Image (cartoon, rainbow, N blue to C red):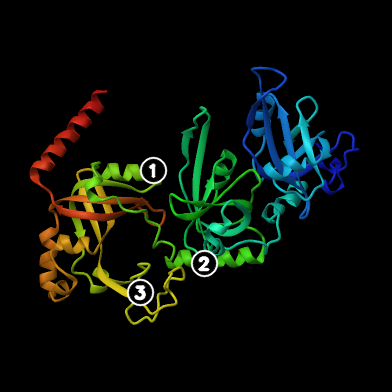
């Protein structure tokens, strides 16, 4: 279809006969269904999306029809693709519904699709696509009209149930959680963590498939979002403010604005410095509540299959323990507030996200070791063993250890190497490490031989039954 025959959104009028409009999709809802009032027992289906054809003009499009027609439309395109809307009805906005359920647009009208007369298909004209693609990076609101995450936290509950604009960077993307509602409808939920130069972690909730699909394409710590008309809520369970995407929200990825560029520079610097890593780890389970036992290969496989942190027990040997390395690799000093690594002669914490960065530096000094654990199935390298767990395992305080000479430190190392331990681990998938897995030791003690024998017997039975199946 020749896109030169299309009418600009700014020029649209209800009097046009058989209009065609081309634009880039900047927002899209999930397909919804409602009982048809005229036909008992029959459902009508609906889909809404928003297209833009210039920096200043964008319009909402809504289709109603049968399951096949509406789901066919939904499968035709995604957010960020250029489409031609052929023969819609150009009609005035419905202030009641438009304001409540659809993005606020600059057009005076909206487009309605009918199953009998209207079509939507991808634009194939490369010149048109090249012209429209940059529009996806222009926010639909004034680029200076936003709250920082610090503003939201500072205002607290006074912003509860309000709809505002937010500029923030993506820190992490969770896994979708699926559920069934009380009226037997399927639902899904995904949580992103956002950050900026004022707050290190802030939850953004996504509830519809289209937004979740968009979120899963984002690159953490390298993506800035301008989120127009996002709902702010106070989460009483977590005792914090949260943001939630709704049917009015339009998300602009990596906006082409000065403010977004400044935040992007900050985000990449904070990521390189490690400043964002200090509070990434979820709360630890108590050791007593950890019961799942894994071999090394099972730990690695689960980390590959599951991007969330998990906990487990391993009966394994210590295959690497560099107690006789330089003291700076064994004992480290960290900020007492945010745990960022510092030197004692620094006046303040170097972590730009530290809540105490403007105060006099308060530090803690402790063991900070990287340990390899091995069993008959493989090795998990560079697990983090820190105080106080390290002190309990080694039987030495920091002061006692630093008083040992090199020979005594080496002897201490060999006391632990190739002994079998019962290790309680927290496993975090990590894109920064070649192995893709980061282990944190929560507890470590010499394994009871009877317990090891019982565990190994169970493991052999499990393997035997798998081979039999």
Name the disc covering residue 342, or none. Answer: 3
Whether residue 339 is situated above or below residue 131 in the rendered picture:
below
Residue under the point 22% across and 26% down:
465
Mark 2 secondary-structure assignment: loop
Query: Where in the figure is residue 203, as x and y percent of width and height?
Result: 50, 53
Name the disc covering residue 306, or none. Answer: 1
Along the polypeptide, which appears first: circle 2 or circle 3? Answer: 2
Mark 1 secondary-structure assignment: loop
Give me the C-alpha separation between circle 2 and circle 1: 31 Å
Q: Where on the picture, by quarter, is residue 362?
A: bottom left
Residue 81 visible in this rendered orientation of the protein: no
Few, some or many C-alpha atoms within 10 Å of disc 3 (few <14, some 14-19, many ≥20)? Answer: many
Along the polypeptide, which appears first: circle 2 or circle 1? Answer: 2
In screen coordinates, is 204 left or right of 303? Answer: right
In screen coordinates, is 411 left or right of 113? Answer: left
In screen coordinates, is 282 left or right of 84? Answer: left
Between disc 2 and disc 1, the foreground one is 2
Query: Where in the figure is residue 391, as x and y percent of width and height?
Result: 18, 64
Mark 3 secondary-structure assignment: loop
Please, which residue is most extreme toward the top here?
A: 40
Residue 209 visible in this rendered orientation of the protein: yes
Residue under the point 29% across and 72% down:
364
- The mark tally for this picture is 3
- For the C terminus, which image quadrant? top left
Few, some or many C-alpha atoms within 10 Å of disc 2 (few <14, some 14-19, many ≥20)? Answer: some
Q: Nearer the viewer, residue 31 or 234?
A: 234
Contact? badges 3 and 1 (CB < 8 Å) = no
Along the polypeptide, which appears first: circle 3 or circle 1? Answer: 1
């Amino acid at each position: 279809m020749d896109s030169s025959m299309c009418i600009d959104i700014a020029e649209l009028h209800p009097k046009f006969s058989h209009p065609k409009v081309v634009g880039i999709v900047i927002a899209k809802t999930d397909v919804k269904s409602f009982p048809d009032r005229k036909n008992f027992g029959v459902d009508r289906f609906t889909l809404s999306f928003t297209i833009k054809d210039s920096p200043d003009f964008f319009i909402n499009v809504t289709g109603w029809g049968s399951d096949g027609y509406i789901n066919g439309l939904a499968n035709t395109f995604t957010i960020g693709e250029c489409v031609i809307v052929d023969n819609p009805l150009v009609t005035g906005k419905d202030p009641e519904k438009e304001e409540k359920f659809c993005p606020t647009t600059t057009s005076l009208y909206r487009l309605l699709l009918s199953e009998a007369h209207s079509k939507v298909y991808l634009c194939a004209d490369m010149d048109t696509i090249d012209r429209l693609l940059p529009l996806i990076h222009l926010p639909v609101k004034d680029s200076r009209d936003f709250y920082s995450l610090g503003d939201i936290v500072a205002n607290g509950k006074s912003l509860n149930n309000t709809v505002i604009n937010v500029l923030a960077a993506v820190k992490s993307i969770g896994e979708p959680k699926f559920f069934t509602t009380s009226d037997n409808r399927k639902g899904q939920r995904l949580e992103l963590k956002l950050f900026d130069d004022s707050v290190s972690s802030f939850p953004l909730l996504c509830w519809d498939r289209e937004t979740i699909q968009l979120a899963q394409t984002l690159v953490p710590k390298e993506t800035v979002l301008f989120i127009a008309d996002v709902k702010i809520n106070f989460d009483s369970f977590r005792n914090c403010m949260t943001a939630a995407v709704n049917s009015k929200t339009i998300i602009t990825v990596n906006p082409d604005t000065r403010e977004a560029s400044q935040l992007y520079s900050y985000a990449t610097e904070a990521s390189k410095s490690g400043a964002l890593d200090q509070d990434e780890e979820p709360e630890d389970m108590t050791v007593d509540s950890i019961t799942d036992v894994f071999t090394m290969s099972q730990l690695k496989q689960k980390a590959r299959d599951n991007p969330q942190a998990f906990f487990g027990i391993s009966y394994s040997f210590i295959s690497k323990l560099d107690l006789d390395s330089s003291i700076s690799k064994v004992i480290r000093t960290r900020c007492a507030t945010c745990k960022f690594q510092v030197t004692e002669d620094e006046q303040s914490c170097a972590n730009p996200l530290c809540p105490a960065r403007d105060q006099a530096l308060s530090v803690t000094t402790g063991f900070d070791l990287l340990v390899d654990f091995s069993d008959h199935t493989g090795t998990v390298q560079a697990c983090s063993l820190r105080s106080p767990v390290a002190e309990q395992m080694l039987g030495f305080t920091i002061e006692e250890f630093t008083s040992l000479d090199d020979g005594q430190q080496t002897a201490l190392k060999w006391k632990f190497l190739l002994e079998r331990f019962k290790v309680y681990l927290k496993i975090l998938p990590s894109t920064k490490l070649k192995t893709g897995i980061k282990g944190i030791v929560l507890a470590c003690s010499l394994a009871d031989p009877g317990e090891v024998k019982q565990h190994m017997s169970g493991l052999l039975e499990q393997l035997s039954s798998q081979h039999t199946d």
